[in-house]
Amino acid sequence: MLPESLPVFLLRLLVSPALPGALFLLLGSLISRHPPKKLNIYYGYRTRRSMLNQDTWTEGNQYSTALIIRLAKPCLLLGIACSLLVPLPVLLFVSAGAVLAIVSLVLILTEKRLGMLFDRDGNRR
């Protein structure tokens, strides 16, 4: 299905997974260029495990940022394709699903990596 007009196509892009993909790509790039240097409660990948010490903090932030960028790129491309092919009401659900998938994958994979590299007290294995 081709968009009827440019404004309709732009609206479809705004509610498609292209927007979250673009936002995650922007966020990942921003954090990659300006990573949080010290442990804090405001900025960065913040979970109980990542905030055990500076080493877990650095590893968690570096890994999650790289993962966000890797996952955002296909989400962006999928969103553009979906805006051309999927009906508008369905796009909202696809977009929400894309956000949940990216956030879930980043959390699960980063926590798994931290669990492999560090013990419960934050000491490297």
Image (cartoon, rainbow, N blue to C red):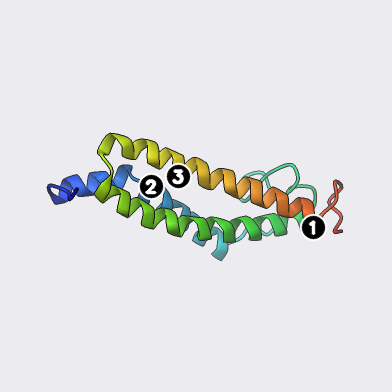
| 100 is higher (above) or lower (below) than 63 | above
Mark-to-mark CA distance, 1 and 3: 28 Å
Number of the label disc, if any, that sits on residue 66: none
Hey, what amino acid is under mark 3?
A: Ala
For this orientation, the residue located farthest to the left is 4
Q: Quadrant of the C terminus?
A: bottom right
The residue that appears at 65% across and 46% down in the rendered structure is 108
Hey, what amino acid is under mark 1?
A: Leu
Hey, what amino acid is under mark 2?
A: Pro
Provide the secondary structure element on which disc 2 rests: loop
Q: Which residue is mark 1?
A: 117
Q: Give the mark, 1 or 3, whose residue is nearer the N terminus.
A: 3
Number of the label disc, if any, that sits on residue 98: 3
Give the crowd class for mark 3: few <14, some 14-19, many >=20 residues within 10 Å. many
Give the crowd class for mark 1: few <14, some 14-19, many >=20 residues within 10 Å. some
Nearer to me, 87 or 53: 87
- When asked about the image quadrant of residue 49, the answer is top right
Give the crowd class for mark 2: few <14, some 14-19, many >=20 residues within 10 Å. many
Query: Is 36 situated left or right of 83 in this image?
Result: right
Q: Position of residue 74 (x, y in %)?
A: 44, 57
Query: Is 61 situated left or right of 53 in this image?
Result: left
Q: Position of residue 102 (x, y in %)?
A: 52, 47
Nearer to me, 100 or 62: 100
